[in-house]
Image (cartoon, grey):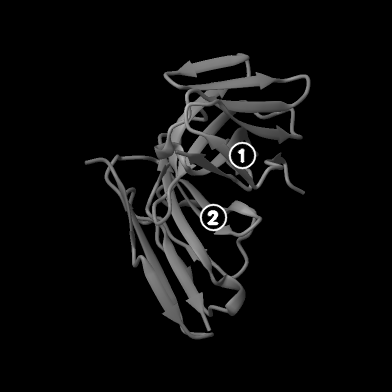
């Protein structure tokens, strides 16, 4: 049961245009959502996050939108640059049992920005 | 430099030969976790630890063991590796907060023949 879904395995965008990466989730108890970027032969690195009480968070060229009623979030990259070519993972966190918390990751979307 | 260090980066082994993948972080993080990445399945949590001597199963713990004797180290142990454990493994750590992003190591690519 995939609680966090990224339905597009890949996306190609022209340099300078907008990249939109999408993520859907099923668990309404998620408190926090994060995006990670992963280059080949490296670990994922944190990109941007959003609390469940907000609907938008912006950091430079990156903006994350959260639509709680649709259980959907998206990452917008404007303008896209060739260096943005990577795999992007959506993740969500929630409190588990016994005072623990856990992070659930999506399957990733490979973004290719064409020069 | 703040980092999570995994070793080795690449490992080829045979079925049944015990192995350990080490993970160390220098950020004094309380929370540490192991993930495996497989095509089409994303990152799946194997085990996690909220603090020293406190460990718990993630979503795919079968065939793995961990220990947390010190805050900085969180080794992943495969007592009897099998081919279905061929994967890319990541160790991660964070502060003890729901809102703190995970810091990942650079990964260990394991092949079990």
Tell me, yes or no, whether the two marked residues, 2 and 1, touch with CB atoms within 8 Å: no
**Mark 1, secondary structure of its residue:** loop
Badge 2: chain ID: B
Horizontal and vertical percent for residue A93?
Answer: 59, 34
Residue A90: tell me if it is visible.
yes
* In the displayed structure image, the side of residue B109 where residue A105 appears, left or right: right
Direction left: furthest residue = B1
Q: Residues within 10 Å of mark 2 (few under 14, many from 20)?
A: many
Discs 2 and 1 lie in a common subunit: no
Location of the N terminus of chain B (image quadrant): top left
Horizontal and vertical percent for residue B81?
Answer: 53, 78
Badge 1: chain ID: A
| Residue at the image position 68 percent from the left and 43 percent from the top | A8
| Residue at the image position 65 percent from the left and 55 percent from the top | B41
User: Can you say whether B48 is above or below A11 in the image?
Assistant: below
* In the displayed structure image, the side of residue A85 where residue B9 appears, left or right: left
- Give the residue at mark 2: B47
Horizontal and vertical percent for residue B8?
Answer: 34, 67
Depth check: B67 or A78 in front? A78
Direction front: furthest residue = A115
Depth check: A98 or A77 in front? A77
Horizontal and vertical percent for residue B26?
Answer: 27, 45
Which is closer to the viewer, label 2 or label 1?
A: 2
User: Can you say whether A95 is above or below B89 in the image?
Assistant: above
Question: Can you tell which mark lies on residue A98?
Answer: 1
Q: Residues within 10 Å of mark 1 (few under 14, many from 20)?
A: few
| Residue at the image position 78 percent from the left and 19 percent from the top | A69
Residue A108 appears in which quarter of the rendering?
top right
Q: CA distance from mark 2 to mark 1?
A: 15 Å
Residue B2 appears in which quarter of the rendering?
top left
| Residue at the image position 51 percent from the left and 52 percent from the top | B55
């Amino acid at each position: 049961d995939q609680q966090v879904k990224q339905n597009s395995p890949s996306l190609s965008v022209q340099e300078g245009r907008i990249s939109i990466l999408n993520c859907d989730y099923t668990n309404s108890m998620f408190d926090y959502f994060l995006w990670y970027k992963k280059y080949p032969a490296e670990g994922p690195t944190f990109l941007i996050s959003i609390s469940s009480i907000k609907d938008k968070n912006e950091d430079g060229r990156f903006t994350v939108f959260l639509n709680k009623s649709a259980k959907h979030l998206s990452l917008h990259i404007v303008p896209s640059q060739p260096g943005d070519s990577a795999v992007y993972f959506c993740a969500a966190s929630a409190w588990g049992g016994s005072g623990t918390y856990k992070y659930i990751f999506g399957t990733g979307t490979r973004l290719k920005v064409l020069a | 430099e703040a980092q999570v260090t995994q070793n080795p980066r690449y490992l080829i082994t045979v079925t049944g030969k015990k192995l350990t993948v080490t993970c160390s972080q220098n950020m004094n993080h309380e929370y540490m976790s192991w993930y495996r990445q497989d095509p089409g399945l994303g990152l799946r949590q194997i085990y996690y630890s909220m603090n020293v001597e406190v460990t718990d199963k993630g979503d795919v713990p079968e065939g793995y063991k961990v220990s947390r004797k010190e805050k900085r180290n969180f080794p992943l142990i495969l007592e009897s590796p099998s081919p279905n454990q061929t994967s890319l493994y990541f160790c991660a750590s964070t502060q003890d907060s729901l809102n703190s992003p995970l810091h990942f190591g650079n990964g260990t690519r394991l092949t079990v023949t």
